[in-house]
Image (cartoon, rainbow, N blue to C red):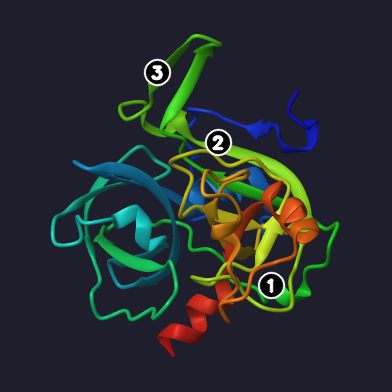
Amino acid sequence: MPNSESQPIYSSSIVTQNLSTPPQVKLSVPAIAQQVSVRIVSDRGMGSGVIVDRTGQTYTVVTNDHVLADNKDHPYSILTADGQTHSGRWLPSANFPNLDLALVQFQSQRVYQVAVIADWKTLAVGDPVYAAGFPNWHWINSDAIEETRHWGTKAFRLTSGKVGMLPDKSLQEGYQLGYTNDIEEGMSGGPVLDRYGRLMGINGRAKYPFKGINVFIFADGSLPSEELFREMESLSWAIPVTRFQQAIR
C-alpha cells in the first residue's frame, strides 16, 4: 500500500480565480502550486513545468530537458491554471550544461502567478515538501488506465511528503534533492515547493527506476554504496532550483 504521506492532497478541475491576488493575501500551498504549474504538450509527449519569470507579456517556464525530448524545434501547447492554452517554444539561448533543465516561453496578456524561488539549502531532511504536475495517466482500476491528454486542468496533481536525502554531491544531470513524494510519468518538470509554497526544485526522477543503480551515478562518476543506493531508489529526485539560477547568470 502506498505511504499515506505521498498521497495526493489536491486534485481539482476548479480554476483558480483572481490569478493576480495581491501580495498581502496569503495563498495555500495547493493554490500556489496550481497557479505556478503548467502542462507542456507536444505531438511526441507530455510533461510539466513551472512559471519562473514574467517580462511584459512573455512568460518563462522551466522544465526538464527530457520533457522536450527531440521536439525542441516545434511548438508546444502550454496549459495554464485558468484552462487556457498558449503556443510555447523552446528557448535555445538558455544553456544548461550537464543539467536536465530547459526553458520554454509563451506570450499572454493575462496575469499568471510567478513562482517565488528560494534557496534549497534552507531545507533539511524531514522538512515537508509538495510535488506538483500533470500525470499522463489515470488508473481507472487495477486493470484499466486512461490517458489524461485532454483532461485540461483536471489532470493536475499535488502530493505531500518530506525531504528524504540531501547528498553533499550532486548526481549526474543536477539531481540532488531526494523526497518521499510520489511522482508519476508526466509530472517531470513540475515544481517541488516547501511549506511556504516557495520553489525549491524541479521534479525529474521517480522512485525505483528501471535502470537501477546506474541512475544514481554521481557527477564525479562514482557510484553510491549498495546500502546508500537502496535508500536513494526509494525516493523521488529533483534538481535544486538554484542550479537553474546559477546556469542563467
Residue 58 spot, x, y in % from top left: 28, 68
For the residues labelled 3 and 2, say whether their Cβ atoms are less than 8 Å apart: no
Residue 36 shown left or right of residue 122 in the figure = left
Q: Residue at x 84, y 62 (%)?
A: 125
In the picture as drawn, the residue positioned furthest to the right comes out as 126
Q: Which residue is mark 1?
A: 120
Q: Give the x, y percent position of residue 79.
A: 33, 44
Give the labeled residue for mark 3.
146
Q: Nearer the viewer, residue 89 or 224?
A: 224
Q: Is residue 40 visible?
A: yes
Q: Residue furthest bottom?
A: 249
For the C terminus, the image quarter is bottom left
Q: CA distance from mark 3 to mark 2?
A: 15 Å
Where is residue 60, by image quadrant?
bottom left
Mark 3 burial class by Cα count in 10 Å: few <14, some 14-19, many 20+: few
Left or right, residue 85 beside residue 3: left
Check residue 178 in the rendering and tell me which mark sits there, or answer none. none
Dot 1 alpha-carbon crowd within 10 angstroms: few under 14, some 14 to 19, many 20 or more: many
Rounded to the nearest whole Å, what is the CA distance between mark 2 and mark 1?
Answer: 22 Å
Q: Which residue is mark 2?
A: 157
Are dots 3 and 1 in contact, CB under 8 Å?
A: no
Instruction: Inspect the image, locate mark 3, and give the three-letter code of the amino acid beneath it.
Output: Glu
Q: Is residue 84 above or below residue 249?
A: above
* Other-residue count near label 2 (Cα within 10 Å), few / some / many at <14 / 14–19 / ≥20: many
Q: Earlier in the sequence, mark 2 or mark 1?
A: 1
Q: Is residue 110 visible?
A: no
N-term mark: 3 or 2: 3
Q: Which one is in front, 226 or 199?
A: 226
